[in-house]
Amino acid sequence: MRIQHLIPISYITYKEYDMLKILSGKQMREADQYTIAYEPVSSLQLMERAAAAFVAQFGKDFVALKHPVYILCGPGNNGGDGLAVARMLLHKSYEVWVWILPAEKHSADFSANYKRLESNYSTRIRQISSSDEISRIPSHAIVIDAILGTGLNEPVQSGSRYFPFIQQINECNFEYVVSVDIPSGLFADQTTPGIAVKAHIAYTFQSPKLAMLLPENGVYVQDFKVLDIGLHEDYLDNAITDFYYLEQHDANEMLHDRSKYSHKGTFGHACIMAGSYGKMGAAVLSAKACLRSGAGLVTARIPACGYEIMQTAVPEVMCLPDVSENILADMTLPVVYDALAVGPGIGTAAATAQALQECIAKQKNPMVLDADALNILSQHPEWLSLLPSGSILTPHPREFQRLAGSWENDFERLSLLQQFARKYGVTVVLKGAHTAVATPDGKVYFNATGNAGMATAGSGDVLTGIIAGLLAQRYTPEQSAILGVYLHGLAGDMALQNQSMESMIASDIIDALGAAFRHVSY
Protein backbone atom coordinates (compact mmCIF):
# COMPACT_ATOMS: atom_id res chain seq x y z
CA MET A 1 0.00 0.00 0.00
CA ARG A 2 1.28 3.44 -0.88
CA ILE A 3 0.04 6.67 0.65
CA GLN A 4 0.72 9.88 -1.18
CA HIS A 5 1.51 13.07 0.76
CA LEU A 6 1.84 16.47 -0.83
CA ILE A 7 3.82 19.20 0.96
CA PRO A 8 2.24 21.52 1.76
CA ILE A 9 -1.44 20.56 1.51
CA SER A 10 -3.71 23.30 0.17
CA TYR A 11 -7.28 23.58 1.39
CA ILE A 12 -10.00 26.22 1.11
CA THR A 13 -10.09 29.99 1.43
CA TYR A 14 -12.52 32.21 3.35
CA LYS A 15 -13.25 35.72 2.25
CA GLU A 16 -13.23 37.64 5.54
CA TYR A 17 -9.84 36.68 6.94
CA ASP A 18 -8.58 34.70 3.97
CA MET A 19 -7.45 32.08 6.48
CA LEU A 20 -8.95 28.71 7.27
CA LYS A 21 -11.03 29.09 10.42
CA ILE A 22 -10.94 26.42 13.08
CA LEU A 23 -14.55 26.07 14.14
CA SER A 24 -15.99 24.34 17.20
CA GLY A 25 -18.09 21.20 16.98
CA LYS A 26 -21.17 23.30 17.71
CA GLN A 27 -20.29 25.74 14.93
CA MET A 28 -19.78 22.88 12.48
CA ARG A 29 -23.26 21.54 13.25
CA GLU A 30 -24.65 25.06 12.84
CA ALA A 31 -22.85 25.36 9.49
CA ASP A 32 -24.49 22.13 8.34
CA GLN A 33 -27.94 23.39 9.33
CA TYR A 34 -27.36 26.80 7.76
CA THR A 35 -26.30 25.16 4.50
CA ILE A 36 -29.33 22.88 4.54
CA ALA A 37 -31.64 25.86 5.10
CA TYR A 38 -30.10 28.47 2.81
CA GLU A 39 -28.39 26.68 -0.08
CA PRO A 40 -30.83 24.89 0.12
CA VAL A 41 -29.86 21.23 0.19
CA SER A 42 -31.25 18.24 2.06
CA SER A 43 -29.27 16.77 4.93
CA LEU A 44 -29.02 13.54 2.95
CA GLN A 45 -27.58 15.38 -0.04
CA LEU A 46 -25.05 17.13 2.20
CA MET A 47 -24.05 13.74 3.60
CA GLU A 48 -23.61 12.50 0.04
CA ARG A 49 -21.36 15.48 -0.67
CA ALA A 50 -19.23 14.73 2.38
CA ALA A 51 -18.93 11.05 1.45
CA ALA A 52 -17.91 11.94 -2.11
CA ALA A 53 -15.16 14.22 -0.80
CA PHE A 54 -13.97 11.45 1.52
CA VAL A 55 -13.88 8.86 -1.26
CA ALA A 56 -12.04 11.22 -3.63
CA GLN A 57 -9.29 11.77 -1.06
CA PHE A 58 -9.22 8.11 -0.09
CA GLY A 59 -8.67 7.18 -3.74
CA LYS A 60 -5.67 9.55 -3.92
CA ASP A 61 -4.05 8.37 -0.72
CA PHE A 62 -4.69 4.64 -0.98
CA VAL A 63 -3.77 3.85 -4.55
CA ALA A 64 -3.65 0.05 -4.20
CA LEU A 65 -6.85 -2.01 -4.19
CA LYS A 66 -5.35 -5.21 -2.74
CA HIS A 67 -6.23 -4.31 0.84
CA PRO A 68 -9.75 -5.04 2.07
CA VAL A 69 -11.65 -2.13 3.57
CA TYR A 70 -13.75 -2.61 6.70
CA ILE A 71 -16.10 0.22 7.61
CA LEU A 72 -17.37 0.28 11.21
CA CYS A 73 -20.57 2.30 11.47
CA GLY A 74 -22.25 3.74 14.52
CA PRO A 75 -25.95 4.67 14.65
CA GLY A 76 -25.79 8.40 13.95
CA ASN A 77 -24.87 10.62 11.04
CA ASN A 78 -21.18 9.70 11.29
CA GLY A 79 -22.29 6.13 10.64
CA GLY A 80 -24.49 7.41 7.82
CA ASP A 81 -21.38 9.00 6.28
CA GLY A 82 -19.68 5.62 6.56
CA LEU A 83 -22.53 3.85 4.76
CA ALA A 84 -22.41 6.37 1.90
CA VAL A 85 -18.63 5.97 1.70
CA ALA A 86 -19.06 2.19 1.53
CA ARG A 87 -21.51 2.42 -1.38
CA MET A 88 -19.18 4.71 -3.33
CA LEU A 89 -16.09 2.60 -2.69
CA LEU A 90 -17.93 -0.57 -3.72
CA HIS A 91 -18.94 1.19 -6.92
CA LYS A 92 -15.21 1.83 -7.52
CA SER A 93 -14.46 -1.90 -7.06
CA TYR A 94 -12.83 -1.73 -3.64
CA GLU A 95 -13.29 -4.84 -1.51
CA VAL A 96 -15.51 -3.34 1.19
CA TRP A 97 -17.20 -4.88 4.21
CA VAL A 98 -19.60 -2.88 6.35
CA TRP A 99 -20.03 -3.78 10.02
CA ILE A 100 -22.90 -2.15 11.88
CA LEU A 101 -22.36 -1.72 15.60
CA PRO A 102 -25.25 -2.41 17.98
CA ALA A 103 -27.69 0.41 18.73
CA GLU A 104 -31.24 0.91 19.96
CA LYS A 105 -32.08 3.42 17.23
CA HIS A 106 -30.55 5.09 14.19
CA SER A 107 -30.67 8.59 12.74
CA ALA A 108 -32.93 9.21 9.76
CA ASP A 109 -30.01 9.79 7.39
CA PHE A 110 -28.31 6.62 8.62
CA SER A 111 -31.45 4.65 7.83
CA ALA A 112 -31.78 6.20 4.39
CA ASN A 113 -28.18 5.39 3.50
CA TYR A 114 -28.54 1.88 4.90
CA LYS A 115 -31.43 1.22 2.51
CA ARG A 116 -29.41 2.56 -0.43
CA LEU A 117 -26.49 0.31 0.41
CA GLU A 118 -28.59 -2.75 1.17
CA SER A 119 -30.47 -2.56 -2.14
CA ASN A 120 -27.34 -3.42 -4.12
CA TYR A 121 -24.77 -4.70 -1.64
CA SER A 122 -26.68 -6.54 1.09
CA THR A 123 -24.08 -9.33 1.22
CA ARG A 124 -21.45 -6.78 2.23
CA ILE A 125 -23.30 -5.71 5.39
CA ARG A 126 -23.02 -7.40 8.74
CA GLN A 127 -24.56 -6.59 12.10
CA ILE A 128 -22.10 -7.26 14.92
CA SER A 129 -22.91 -7.57 18.59
CA SER A 130 -19.56 -8.18 20.24
CA SER A 131 -16.30 -6.27 20.14
CA ASP A 132 -14.49 -9.61 19.92
CA GLU A 133 -15.54 -9.83 16.29
CA ILE A 134 -13.28 -6.90 15.41
CA SER A 135 -10.25 -9.08 16.13
CA ARG A 136 -11.27 -11.19 13.12
CA ILE A 137 -10.60 -8.32 10.72
CA PRO A 138 -7.33 -9.03 8.84
CA SER A 139 -4.44 -7.01 10.22
CA HIS A 140 -3.56 -5.74 6.73
CA ALA A 141 -7.05 -4.29 6.24
CA ILE A 142 -7.84 -0.59 6.04
CA VAL A 143 -10.33 0.12 8.80
CA ILE A 144 -12.59 3.13 8.35
CA ASP A 145 -13.90 4.46 11.65
CA ALA A 146 -17.42 5.90 11.27
CA ILE A 147 -18.72 5.18 14.77
CA LEU A 148 -19.05 8.56 16.52
CA GLY A 149 -18.70 12.12 15.21
CA THR A 150 -18.47 15.67 16.55
CA GLY A 151 -21.86 15.36 18.23
CA LEU A 152 -20.29 13.36 21.05
CA ASN A 153 -21.85 14.47 24.33
CA GLU A 154 -20.20 12.16 26.86
CA PRO A 155 -16.79 10.49 27.11
CA VAL A 156 -16.34 6.91 25.99
CA GLN A 157 -15.33 5.26 29.25
CA SER A 158 -15.59 1.82 30.79
CA GLY A 159 -19.27 0.91 30.81
CA SER A 160 -20.06 2.96 27.70
CA ARG A 161 -21.67 1.02 24.84
CA TYR A 162 -18.81 1.63 22.43
CA PHE A 163 -15.90 1.45 24.86
CA PRO A 164 -15.05 -2.23 24.13
CA PHE A 165 -15.32 -1.68 20.37
CA ILE A 166 -12.95 1.29 20.36
CA GLN A 167 -10.61 -0.48 22.76
CA GLN A 168 -10.52 -3.50 20.44
CA ILE A 169 -9.78 -1.34 17.39
CA ASN A 170 -6.82 0.20 19.21
CA GLU A 171 -5.47 -3.15 20.37
CA CYS A 172 -5.60 -4.82 16.97
CA ASN A 173 -2.81 -2.73 15.41
CA PHE A 174 -4.41 -2.54 11.99
CA GLU A 175 -2.15 -1.40 9.16
CA TYR A 176 -4.21 1.72 8.63
CA VAL A 177 -7.15 3.28 10.47
CA VAL A 178 -8.94 6.17 8.79
CA SER A 179 -11.52 8.19 10.73
CA VAL A 180 -14.50 9.93 9.15
CA ASP A 181 -14.37 13.60 10.23
CA ILE A 182 -12.93 12.89 13.71
CA PRO A 183 -11.66 9.80 15.57
CA SER A 184 -14.57 8.26 17.44
CA GLY A 185 -14.55 9.22 21.10
CA LEU A 186 -12.45 12.37 20.61
CA PHE A 187 -14.02 15.65 21.71
CA ALA A 188 -13.51 18.35 19.08
CA ASP A 189 -12.87 21.30 21.38
CA GLN A 190 -12.27 20.08 24.91
CA THR A 191 -10.01 17.55 26.55
CA THR A 192 -11.01 13.90 26.15
CA PRO A 193 -11.27 12.06 29.50
CA GLY A 194 -12.21 8.73 27.96
CA ILE A 195 -10.72 6.76 25.08
CA ALA A 196 -10.86 7.41 21.35
CA VAL A 197 -9.93 5.58 18.19
CA LYS A 198 -6.21 5.83 17.41
CA ALA A 199 -6.41 6.94 13.81
CA HIS A 200 -3.50 7.07 11.42
CA ILE A 201 -5.37 9.80 9.56
CA ALA A 202 -8.68 11.64 9.86
CA TYR A 203 -10.44 13.09 6.84
CA THR A 204 -12.11 16.01 8.51
CA PHE A 205 -14.84 18.07 6.91
CA GLN A 206 -14.50 21.77 6.06
CA SER A 207 -12.45 22.83 9.10
CA PRO A 208 -9.71 21.32 11.24
CA LYS A 209 -10.94 20.37 14.69
CA LEU A 210 -9.04 22.10 17.48
CA ALA A 211 -8.34 18.82 19.25
CA MET A 212 -6.40 17.59 16.22
CA LEU A 213 -3.79 20.31 16.68
CA LEU A 214 -2.89 19.64 20.31
CA PRO A 215 -0.11 17.29 21.48
CA GLU A 216 -2.26 15.44 24.00
CA ASN A 217 -4.27 14.01 21.10
CA GLY A 218 -1.32 12.99 18.96
CA VAL A 219 -1.95 9.36 19.84
CA TYR A 220 -5.46 9.66 18.36
CA VAL A 221 -4.70 11.77 15.28
CA GLN A 222 -1.34 11.08 13.67
CA ASP A 223 -2.35 13.08 10.60
CA PHE A 224 -5.41 14.77 9.13
CA LYS A 225 -6.61 16.30 5.91
CA VAL A 226 -9.32 18.92 5.53
CA LEU A 227 -11.95 18.24 2.88
CA ASP A 228 -14.10 21.00 1.41
CA ILE A 229 -17.72 19.84 1.43
CA GLY A 230 -19.17 23.16 0.28
CA LEU A 231 -20.75 24.46 3.47
CA HIS A 232 -22.43 27.83 2.98
CA GLU A 233 -19.89 30.64 2.69
CA ASP A 234 -22.14 33.17 4.42
CA TYR A 235 -22.00 31.14 7.62
CA LEU A 236 -18.28 30.48 7.33
CA ASP A 237 -17.49 34.13 6.61
CA ASN A 238 -19.38 35.33 9.66
CA ALA A 239 -18.40 32.60 12.11
CA ILE A 240 -16.43 34.04 15.02
CA THR A 241 -13.34 32.19 16.20
CA ASP A 242 -9.96 32.90 17.77
CA PHE A 243 -8.32 30.01 15.94
CA TYR A 244 -6.95 29.74 12.41
CA TYR A 245 -4.96 27.23 10.37
CA LEU A 246 -2.11 28.66 8.33
CA GLU A 247 -1.74 27.47 4.73
CA GLN A 248 0.44 28.16 1.71
CA HIS A 249 -1.81 30.82 0.19
CA ASP A 250 -1.72 32.76 3.48
CA ALA A 251 2.08 32.77 3.43
CA ASN A 252 2.04 33.75 -0.24
CA GLU A 253 -0.18 36.75 0.45
CA MET A 254 2.12 37.94 3.24
CA LEU A 255 5.31 37.66 1.22
CA HIS A 256 6.71 41.03 0.09
CA ASP A 257 7.68 41.67 -3.51
CA ARG A 258 11.26 42.82 -4.19
CA SER A 259 11.84 45.82 -6.38
CA LYS A 260 14.42 45.75 -9.16
CA TYR A 261 16.01 48.85 -7.62
CA SER A 262 16.31 47.46 -4.09
CA HIS A 263 19.61 47.48 -2.20
CA LYS A 264 20.76 45.92 1.06
CA GLY A 265 19.50 48.88 3.04
CA THR A 266 16.02 48.27 1.67
CA PHE A 267 15.82 44.98 3.51
CA GLY A 268 16.89 46.16 6.91
CA HIS A 269 19.68 45.62 9.38
CA ALA A 270 19.17 42.92 12.01
CA CYS A 271 21.20 42.36 15.14
CA ILE A 272 21.48 38.90 16.68
CA MET A 273 22.66 38.82 20.31
CA ALA A 274 23.69 35.24 20.88
CA GLY A 275 26.29 32.76 22.02
CA SER A 276 28.59 32.00 24.94
CA TYR A 277 31.61 29.81 25.43
CA GLY A 278 30.72 26.36 24.10
CA LYS A 279 27.45 27.56 22.56
CA MET A 280 28.59 29.61 19.61
CA GLY A 281 26.81 27.22 17.26
CA ALA A 282 23.49 28.74 18.34
CA ALA A 283 24.73 32.19 17.32
CA VAL A 284 26.04 30.94 13.97
CA LEU A 285 22.79 29.15 13.11
CA SER A 286 20.62 32.12 14.08
CA ALA A 287 22.73 34.67 12.19
CA LYS A 288 22.96 32.54 9.07
CA ALA A 289 19.20 31.89 9.08
CA CYS A 290 18.61 35.63 9.46
CA LEU A 291 20.61 36.27 6.30
CA ARG A 292 18.92 33.43 4.43
CA SER A 293 15.51 34.87 5.31
CA GLY A 294 16.30 38.07 3.41
CA ALA A 295 17.73 40.61 5.84
CA GLY A 296 19.97 43.06 4.00
CA LEU A 297 22.54 43.28 6.80
CA VAL A 298 23.14 41.19 9.89
CA THR A 299 25.33 42.07 12.84
CA ALA A 300 26.12 39.52 15.55
CA ARG A 301 26.66 40.74 19.09
CA ILE A 302 28.70 37.88 20.55
CA PRO A 303 31.22 37.18 23.31
CA ALA A 304 34.83 37.75 22.26
CA CYS A 305 35.53 34.01 22.16
CA GLY A 306 33.13 33.70 19.24
CA TYR A 307 34.67 36.32 16.94
CA GLU A 308 36.79 34.02 14.80
CA ILE A 309 34.10 31.33 14.80
CA MET A 310 31.45 33.69 13.43
CA GLN A 311 33.72 35.40 10.90
CA THR A 312 34.80 32.02 9.58
CA ALA A 313 31.42 30.25 9.61
CA VAL A 314 29.35 33.15 8.23
CA PRO A 315 31.63 35.74 6.58
CA GLU A 316 28.63 37.76 5.43
CA VAL A 317 27.80 38.63 9.06
CA MET A 318 29.39 41.62 10.80
CA CYS A 319 30.56 41.12 14.39
CA LEU A 320 30.35 43.21 17.54
CA PRO A 321 32.49 41.34 20.10
CA ASP A 322 31.63 41.82 23.75
CA VAL A 323 34.30 43.01 26.18
CA SER A 324 33.69 39.74 28.00
CA GLU A 325 35.53 36.74 26.65
CA ASN A 326 32.99 34.00 27.35
CA ILE A 327 29.56 35.57 27.87
CA LEU A 328 27.46 38.52 26.81
CA ALA A 329 27.93 40.98 29.65
CA ASP A 330 27.07 44.16 27.73
CA MET A 331 24.14 44.45 25.33
CA THR A 332 24.63 48.14 24.62
CA LEU A 333 24.38 48.77 20.88
CA PRO A 334 25.99 51.57 18.85
CA VAL A 335 22.97 52.07 16.56
CA VAL A 336 19.25 51.34 16.45
CA TYR A 337 18.69 48.21 14.38
CA ASP A 338 15.60 47.38 12.34
CA ALA A 339 15.30 44.11 14.24
CA LEU A 340 16.89 42.79 17.40
CA ALA A 341 16.91 39.15 18.49
CA VAL A 342 18.42 37.96 21.73
CA GLY A 343 18.76 34.64 23.49
CA PRO A 344 20.23 31.70 21.54
CA GLY A 345 23.05 30.21 23.57
CA ILE A 346 23.65 33.23 25.82
CA GLY A 347 23.40 31.35 29.11
CA THR A 348 21.90 32.72 32.32
CA ALA A 349 24.90 34.22 34.10
CA ALA A 350 24.13 37.15 36.41
CA ALA A 351 26.02 39.61 34.19
CA THR A 352 24.09 38.42 31.14
CA ALA A 353 20.78 38.79 32.99
CA GLN A 354 21.69 42.32 34.04
CA ALA A 355 22.65 43.19 30.48
CA LEU A 356 19.33 41.82 29.22
CA GLN A 357 17.36 43.91 31.71
CA GLU A 358 19.16 47.07 30.59
CA CYS A 359 18.63 46.16 26.94
CA ILE A 360 14.90 45.62 27.42
CA ALA A 361 14.56 48.91 29.31
CA LYS A 362 16.24 50.86 26.49
CA GLN A 363 14.63 49.11 23.54
CA LYS A 364 11.68 50.89 21.94
CA ASN A 365 11.04 48.62 18.95
CA PRO A 366 9.75 45.03 19.12
CA MET A 367 12.36 42.43 20.05
CA VAL A 368 12.61 38.70 19.36
CA LEU A 369 13.41 36.76 22.54
CA ASP A 370 14.31 33.09 22.58
CA ALA A 371 16.02 30.37 24.60
CA ASP A 372 18.10 31.72 27.49
CA ALA A 373 16.54 35.18 27.20
CA LEU A 374 13.25 33.49 28.08
CA ASN A 375 14.85 31.52 30.88
CA ILE A 376 16.15 34.76 32.35
CA LEU A 377 12.72 36.36 32.03
CA SER A 378 11.16 33.41 33.85
CA GLN A 379 13.50 34.17 36.77
CA HIS A 380 12.52 37.86 36.66
CA PRO A 381 8.81 37.90 35.65
CA GLU A 382 8.54 41.57 36.62
CA TRP A 383 10.59 42.38 33.50
CA LEU A 384 7.85 41.04 31.22
CA SER A 385 5.89 44.26 31.58
CA LEU A 386 8.95 46.17 30.33
CA LEU A 387 9.04 44.40 26.97
CA PRO A 388 8.45 46.69 23.99
CA SER A 389 4.93 46.33 22.62
CA GLY A 390 4.77 43.81 19.80
CA SER A 391 7.80 41.83 20.91
CA ILE A 392 7.99 38.19 19.84
CA LEU A 393 8.69 35.36 22.28
CA THR A 394 9.53 31.92 20.91
CA PRO A 395 9.36 29.38 23.77
CA HIS A 396 9.18 25.62 23.59
CA PRO A 397 6.58 24.12 25.98
CA ARG A 398 8.89 23.85 29.00
CA GLU A 399 10.09 27.44 28.57
CA PHE A 400 6.49 28.60 28.29
CA GLN A 401 5.61 26.72 31.46
CA ARG A 402 8.37 28.54 33.31
CA LEU A 403 7.00 31.85 32.02
CA ALA A 404 3.25 31.33 32.38
CA GLY A 405 2.73 28.56 34.92
CA SER A 406 1.51 24.98 34.69
CA TRP A 407 -1.62 23.52 33.13
CA GLU A 408 -3.74 20.40 33.45
CA ASN A 409 -4.22 19.74 29.74
CA ASP A 410 -3.45 21.27 26.35
CA PHE A 411 -6.72 23.20 26.21
CA GLU A 412 -5.75 24.96 29.45
CA ARG A 413 -2.31 25.60 27.98
CA LEU A 414 -3.93 27.16 24.92
CA SER A 415 -6.01 29.44 27.14
CA LEU A 416 -2.87 30.42 29.09
CA LEU A 417 -1.15 31.20 25.80
CA GLN A 418 -3.93 33.59 24.77
CA GLN A 419 -4.02 35.25 28.19
CA PHE A 420 -0.24 35.72 28.23
CA ALA A 421 -0.15 37.31 24.76
CA ARG A 422 -2.99 39.68 25.67
CA LYS A 423 -1.59 40.61 29.09
CA TYR A 424 1.86 41.59 27.87
CA GLY A 425 0.98 42.80 24.37
CA VAL A 426 3.35 40.32 22.75
CA THR A 427 3.27 37.65 20.07
CA VAL A 428 4.09 34.21 21.44
CA VAL A 429 5.35 31.41 19.21
CA LEU A 430 4.72 28.19 21.14
CA LYS A 431 6.91 25.72 19.30
CA GLY A 432 6.04 22.13 18.50
CA ALA A 433 4.04 20.13 16.00
CA HIS A 434 1.47 22.62 14.62
CA THR A 435 3.34 25.51 16.27
CA ALA A 436 0.80 27.97 17.71
CA VAL A 437 1.34 31.70 17.18
CA ALA A 438 -0.69 33.78 19.64
CA THR A 439 -1.04 37.50 18.92
CA PRO A 440 -1.85 40.35 21.32
CA ASP A 441 -5.51 40.35 20.25
CA GLY A 442 -5.91 36.75 21.47
CA LYS A 443 -5.95 35.13 18.04
CA VAL A 444 -4.02 31.89 17.58
CA TYR A 445 -2.61 30.69 14.25
CA PHE A 446 -1.66 27.02 13.96
CA ASN A 447 1.02 26.04 11.50
CA ALA A 448 0.55 23.42 8.77
CA THR A 449 4.20 22.73 7.94
CA GLY A 450 7.04 20.88 9.63
CA ASN A 451 7.91 17.35 10.69
CA ALA A 452 9.43 15.39 13.56
CA GLY A 453 12.89 15.50 11.96
CA MET A 454 13.05 19.15 13.06
CA ALA A 455 13.14 18.08 16.70
CA THR A 456 16.88 18.56 16.75
CA ALA A 457 19.42 20.84 18.41
CA GLY A 458 19.55 24.30 16.84
CA SER A 459 16.18 24.17 15.07
CA GLY A 460 14.80 26.86 17.38
CA ASP A 461 17.87 29.05 16.83
CA VAL A 462 17.16 28.88 13.10
CA LEU A 463 13.56 29.97 13.68
CA THR A 464 14.73 32.95 15.76
CA GLY A 465 16.98 34.06 12.90
CA ILE A 466 14.23 33.71 10.33
CA ILE A 467 11.77 35.76 12.37
CA ALA A 468 14.38 38.45 13.03
CA GLY A 469 15.22 38.59 9.33
CA LEU A 470 11.59 39.13 8.40
CA LEU A 471 11.14 41.75 11.13
CA ALA A 472 14.14 43.63 9.72
CA GLN A 473 12.37 43.71 6.34
CA ARG A 474 9.44 45.64 7.86
CA TYR A 475 7.03 42.77 8.20
CA THR A 476 4.80 43.41 11.20
CA PRO A 477 5.64 41.40 14.33
CA GLU A 478 2.59 39.21 13.76
CA GLN A 479 3.48 38.62 10.11
CA SER A 480 7.12 37.95 11.01
CA ALA A 481 6.10 35.26 13.49
CA ILE A 482 3.39 33.64 11.36
CA LEU A 483 5.33 33.69 8.09
CA GLY A 484 8.56 32.75 9.85
CA VAL A 485 6.99 29.69 11.43
CA TYR A 486 5.49 28.60 8.11
CA LEU A 487 8.76 29.01 6.19
CA HIS A 488 10.74 27.31 8.95
CA GLY A 489 8.44 24.28 8.84
CA LEU A 490 8.33 24.21 5.06
CA ALA A 491 12.13 24.33 4.88
CA GLY A 492 12.14 21.35 7.23
CA ASP A 493 9.75 19.54 4.91
CA MET A 494 11.94 20.39 1.93
CA ALA A 495 15.05 19.19 3.78
CA LEU A 496 13.33 15.89 4.47
CA GLN A 497 13.36 15.16 0.75
CA ASN A 498 17.14 14.69 1.01
CA GLN A 499 17.38 13.50 4.62
CA SER A 500 15.58 11.21 7.01
CA MET A 501 13.87 12.36 10.18
CA GLU A 502 16.72 10.78 12.10
CA SER A 503 19.51 12.41 10.09
CA MET A 504 18.17 15.94 9.76
CA ILE A 505 20.12 18.71 11.49
CA ALA A 506 19.40 22.42 11.87
CA SER A 507 21.79 23.39 9.08
CA ASP A 508 19.67 21.36 6.67
CA ILE A 509 16.73 23.63 7.45
CA ILE A 510 18.79 26.72 6.61
CA ASP A 511 20.01 25.12 3.38
CA ALA A 512 16.40 24.48 2.32
CA LEU A 513 15.14 28.01 3.03
CA GLY A 514 15.64 29.10 -0.58
CA ALA A 515 13.45 26.27 -1.83
CA ALA A 516 10.84 27.16 0.78
CA PHE A 517 10.72 30.80 -0.30
CA ARG A 518 10.40 29.75 -3.94
CA HIS A 519 7.59 27.37 -3.11
CA VAL A 520 5.65 29.98 -1.15
CA SER A 521 6.08 32.59 -3.88
CA TYR A 522 4.38 30.43 -6.55
Image (spheres, grey):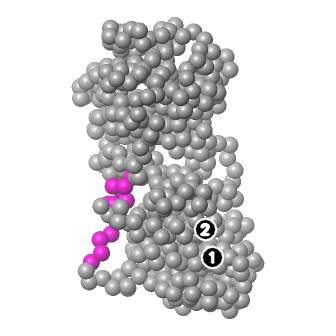
Q: Nearer the viewer, residue 248 or 154?
A: 248
The three-letter code of the residue at mark 1 reads Gly
- Disc number at residue 393? none
Residue named by callout 2: 458
Residue 292 picture quarter? bottom left
Label 1 crowd bin: few (<14), some (14–19), many (20+), radius 10 Å: many
Residue 118, quarter of picture: top left
Q: Is residue 43 above or below residue 474?
A: above
Q: Earlier in the sequence, mark 1 or mark 2?
A: 1
Over which residues does the magenta segment extend?
Answer: 247-259
Q: Is residue 253 magenta?
A: yes
State whether residue 161 appears in this view.
no
Residue 193 seen in the current view: yes
Q: Residue at x 60, y 77 (%)?
A: 283
Distance from label 1 to label 2 (Cα)?
Answer: 8 Å
From what the image shows, is residue 490 above or below residue 283?
above
Q: x, y percentage for residue 80?
A: 40, 19
Secondary element type, mark 1: helix
Q: Residue at x 48, y 70 (%)?
A: 511
Query: In terms of secondary structure, where does tag 2 sit?
Result: loop
What residue is at 59 percent from the left and 45 percent from the top? 215
Residue type highlighted by circle 2? Gly
Label 2 Cα crowd, 10 Å radius (few <14 / some 14-19 / many 20+): many
Image coordinates for residue 183, horizontal then vertical, percent: 52, 31
Q: Nearer the viewer, residue 368 or 246?
A: 246
